[in-house]
Amino acid sequence: MAHLSPLVRQATPVLAARGEGVYLYDDAGRAYLDFTAGIGVTGTGHCHPHVVEAAQRQVATLIHGQFTTVMHKPLLTLVERLGEVLPPGLDSVFFANSGSEAVEAAMRLARQATGRSNVIVFHGSFHGRTVGAASMTTSGTKFRAGFAPIMGGVTVAPFPYAYRYGWDEATAVRFALRELDYILATISAPRETAAFVIEPVLGEGGYVPAPKAFLEGLRERADAHGIVFVLDEVQTGFGRTGKFWGHQHADIRPDVVVMAKGIASGFPLSAIAASSELMAKAWPGSQGGTYGANAVACAAALATLDVIRDEKLVENSAAMGARLLEGARRIASEHARIGDVRGLGLMVGSEFTRSDGEPDVATAQRAQAAAAERGLLLLLCGTWGQVVRMIPALVVNAKQVDEALAIWAEAVREASAT
């Protein structure tokens, strides 16, 4: 008899039977407010009718047309539609299946295009679990331990995580940029540095937004040294932060954008976008894959773009995100164990801290479990699992946000009383 690997552990006890909008239902019909959205994947909600219809229609005509063998219409149409939302100048797209694959494709492109070997990433980042992506991941040792040697050429620079350092944001930014300059002078020479790779908001690292001044400082240095500036928008893209792209909260232009998760409402699809000039510098044969740009996933992605546009989900993310952040901060003000609440759009994290300033993992875990018992599904993040994150679908409304906050207040109260 076969069993699921014991290493694949669930964050909640729910056996999901079906999903609708921001709700999951178990076999007994109990509804759960899903503020995990498949870790940000189901941005249009579970089983949005337009996405379901598009996928069903596509399944009946062509399920898979392998894109290095034949072209198919959903793929070509998706490229055109992405051109309407991609940052200016990024007009060439390569598709893969997962965020990890897309990150590796971006890293490979940067190295081949520049002829340089090194990549600089930022402390607390999560870029994936494959060898290259895991080598660029520092949100926790579990993602990269136990299969050394990992990929060489990766240098880790400080991320301006102001709360962790105990500084104001401006001080943290000055420190991080100075240390980056020091790294460029002592470890990874600019002429050997192919790329900066950064998340606009640290995901697994604790839901920490990258300050505007920091992103702009990276852009300045990338321009000065001919370094490719890669924005890993796997979790932040497609409206999640209240802008279509997370980096749009700063005045910057990326050289490469990496996307996945919210692109296709739950169907496996990822991509990188770059300028035609940059993409043309990749070596022949360096891009490909069996399942990339699957026809059904592309059809779902087209429907996802329709829903985001027609239902104004980017605007809703901004409005509901502000409501969620304000409510979470109000709850935190009543509980000393929550040291910081932060986020952008519908990415909100509450960090639990002990009186001695150390991460309060136990209380965070109790609060997350207590919320699940009351019908609110949440996830942990942060290096020690000390941050509880809220990441509902972009279709969430004010009533649902308020319901989630009411449950969260009860869960925190129970967890803090222990």
Image (cartoon, rainbow, N blue to C red):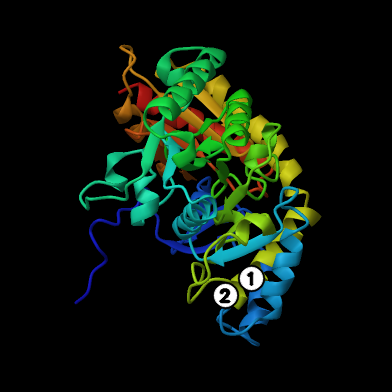
Q: Quadrant of the N terminus?
A: bottom left
Q: Is residue 147 above or below residue 181?
A: below
Taking the image as drawn, is residue 129 in sight? Answer: no
Judged left or right of residue 212, residue 40 is left
Residue shown at 57%/45% (left/top)? 392
- Residue 358: image x %, image y %? 31, 19
Residues at marks 1 and 2 touching, judged by CB atoms closer than 8 Å: yes
Could you say where residue 211 lies in the image, as x and y percent from the top left? 59, 26
Report the amino acid beneath label 2. Answer: Asn
Residue at x 61% of width, y 84% of height? 70
The alpha-carbon separation of the residues under discs 1 and 2 comes to 6 Å
Could you tell me which quadrant the C terminus lies in?
A: top left
Q: Which residue is mark 1?
A: 298
In-front residue for pair 191/199: 191
Depth order, front residue of 111/24: 111
Residue 183 lies left or right of residue 394; in this view the side is: left
Label drawn at residue 84: none
Q: Position of residue 157 (x, y in %)?
A: 42, 30
Q: Which mark is residue 294?
A: 2
**Is residue 130 visible to the viewer in this orientation of the structure?**
yes
